[in-house]
Amino acid sequence: MILAQQIVEAGWRLVETDLTDGTSGNISARCPDGVTALITPSGRDYRLLTERDLVRVDLESGRAEGRWKPSSEWRLHLAIYHARPDINAIIHHHGTWATAVAVAKKTIPVFIGEAADIGPIPTASYAPSGSQELAEAVSQELAKGTNAVLLANHGAVAAGRDLGEAMRRALEVERLAKIYIGSQLLGGPHALNEAEVARSQKFLEAYRVAPVESRKLFPSAPRIFGPVGFQDLVQYSLRSGVTFASLVHAFILQKLHRQDLRT
């Protein structure tokens, strides 16, 4: 339950930081059993997402269990978990600045100390969204040791040992992309040398808090168990800026969908 809660909270964090319009991108986390992962469902707004909406996917077969279809990028997540056993959480977003660099098919070098935590951020070769080709292209880049990859003409992927680390890196990718683009206007970035990168990595390893699985990662996110109720709609409307009418519409559709499942 804690892992599911953290995924829901991470979705809210993506919305609040403008890395998603509510439905774009996807989040997953490897389950403690080591053989399955929880992933966000396809097309569901993070502001309406509950812990029971998440989909459990088998890491070997890709078989999904849940009330909704898994994210269309489930192949991407599984390929990354196979390529990097040390990775337990993945966040894919369509941040504006990161996508701009991805469209230009550039690599963001390690040019500030904080970037040493991620490593150079390459752009994986283009492949259609949701395809096995995209999954292979991205996982191959991550297998080289970096902790984030840009998807050509698409967006960005960041990974970590837990959701807190993956989220920090997802936010950092967007910031580094903005700095990279700005530095290009001033003649181009000057990357740190190997010794400087190694020193920064050592500092960050001591500075960062070790992964914590049980803490509440994103306190601003509301906790909702089970289906969304009327009071939840009022709360979401006030917090997210979504019109109350649109939330009522989503609530009615959810009720109709549940009724269809019973018939």
Image (cartoon, rainbow, N blue to C red):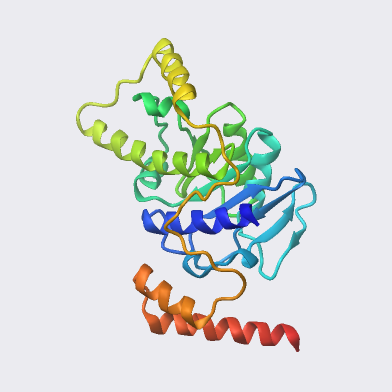
Could you tell whether 108 is left or right of 183 in the image?
right
- For the residue pair 181 and 249, the one nearer the viewer reads as 249
How far from the left and from the top, in percent, is residue 187?
22, 26
How far from the left and from the top, in percent, is residue 63?
77, 57
At a point 68% along the width and 35% down the height, the residue shown is: 83
> In the displayed structure, would residue 78 be above or below residue 18?
above
Quarter of the picture holding the C terminus? bottom right
How far from the left and from the top, in percent, is residue 213?
60, 43
At a point 46% along the width and 39% down the height, the residue shown is: 169
Q: Which residue is the extreme one toward the left?
A: 186
- For the residue pair 18 and 168, the one nearer the viewer reads as 168
Could you tell whether 21 is left or right of 147 in the image?
left
How far from the left and from the top, in percent, is residue 184?
26, 32
At a point 54% along the width and 86% down the height, the residue shown is: 252
Q: Which residue is the extreme one toward the right?
A: 61
Could you tell whether 242 is left or right of 227 in the image?
left
Task: Give the total number of marks visible in the rendering.
Answer: 0
- For the residue pair 48 and 157, the one nearer the viewer reads as 48
